[in-house]
């Protein structure tokens, strides 16, 4: 019986070159126990390939068929990303959120319903985020602005104007020449302070006085000499006068 001997090598790791074996010829490495053949790549080139079954894959030898569990991927499947459900923990967290009406933005629109929108002084519309919230400024009414007693209310430009017109000296007032006489009591019967400017046509000094009740009089200035001016402010409801005789040269009031 004839014996066929292959080209061989006993050198560990030795692999034949494409020049050392022909097509359909085999070579063996007797030290490594590996068999090699020459492959025609079909483009005029050649390579040496190892011949034989897989020695070992995932602890198995021979013709091995692998399952996903063999390589540590037991939880992997072919579900597309778009079809994957959220985890139980994620679903629990999402169930505690407030839903939006837009399905396309439902996930992005989730908010923590335990969060609160707090409103400070002068603001309204706060509350939990389980519903739409509209913040608004709490603007004082015209009456509140004029009275100036509504704490915690905001004032816009119109309300400021209304407050100043109702209370501030000179705001919206005009100077007016009025007929007044010395030693006569007058009263500020307007709703805001007025300013008085006067002068006498006599050279006798006279006090100008104000009183909250017509009984107690307070000196607030006096005319020193002929036509020397005296100016003073009269609060709402207060009386005012020139104490003593004399001829009034002019009397003007800012009211």
Image: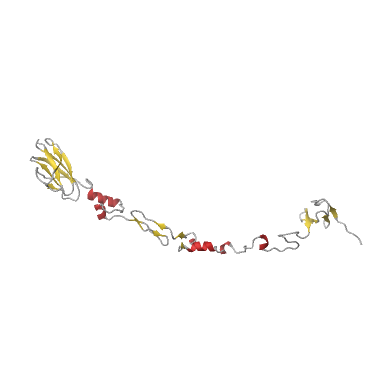
Q: Would residue 206 appear left or right of 83 to someone viewing this image?
A: left
Q: Is residue 251 left or right of residue 47?
A: left
Residue 120 position by quadrant:
bottom left
Which is nearer the eye, 19 or 240?
240
Residue 55 placement (x, y as % from top left): 76, 59
Q: How is the image coloured?
A: secondary structure
Q: Which residue lies furthest to the right in this view?
A: 1
**Relative height, residue 209 to residue 53 (above, below):** above
Judge by depth and name the residue closer to the eye, 109 or 40.
109
Q: Is residue 188 above or below residue 112?
A: above
Q: Hey, which residue is sitting farthest left in the picture?
A: 245
Expressed as whole percent of the image width and height from the top left, the position of residue 41 reads 76, 55
Q: Position of residue 59 (x, y in %)?
A: 72, 60
Locate the N terminus and report the quarter of the image it occupies.
Answer: bottom right
Q: In which quarter of the image is residue 61?
A: bottom right
Q: Residue at x 39, y 59 (%)?
A: 127
Q: Which residue is drawn at 46% across and 59% down?
A: 111
Between 75 and 206, the one lying in front of the other is 75
Number of numbered discs present? 0
- From the viewer's perspective, tell me whether residue 4 is left or right of residue 214: right
């Amino acid at each position: 019986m004839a014996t066929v001997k292959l080209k061989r090598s006993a050198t560990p790791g030795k692999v034949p070159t494409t020049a050392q074996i022909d097509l359909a010829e085999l070579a063996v490495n007797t030290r490594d126990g590996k068999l090699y053949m020459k492959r025609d790549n079909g483009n005029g080139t050649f390579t040496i390939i190892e011949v034989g079954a897989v020695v070992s894959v995932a602890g198995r030898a021979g013709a091995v068929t692998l399952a996903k569990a063999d390589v540590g991927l037991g939880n992997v499947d072919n579900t597309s990303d778009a079809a994957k459900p959220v985890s139980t923990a994620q679903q629990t967290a999402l169930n505690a959120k407030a839903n939006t009406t837009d399905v396309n933005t439902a996930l992005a629109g989730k908010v923590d319903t335990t969060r609160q929108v707090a409103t400070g002084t002068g603001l309204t519309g706060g509350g939990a985020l389980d519903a739409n919230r509209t913040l608004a400024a709490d603007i004082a009414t015209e009456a509140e602005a004029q009275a100036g007693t509504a704490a915690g209310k905001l004032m816009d430009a119109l309300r400021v104007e209304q407050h100043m017109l109702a209370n501030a000296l000179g705001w919206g007032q005009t100077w007016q020449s009025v007929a007044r006489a010395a030693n006569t009591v007058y009263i500020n019967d307007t709703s805001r302070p007025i300013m008085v400017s006067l002068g006498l046509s006599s050279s006798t000094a006279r006090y100008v006085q104000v009183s909250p009740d017509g009984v107690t009089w307070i000196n607030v200035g006096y005319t020193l000499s002929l036509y020397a001016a005296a100016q003073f402010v009269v609060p709402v409801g207060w009386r005012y006068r020139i104490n003593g005789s004399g001829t009034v040269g002019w009397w003007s009031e800012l009211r």
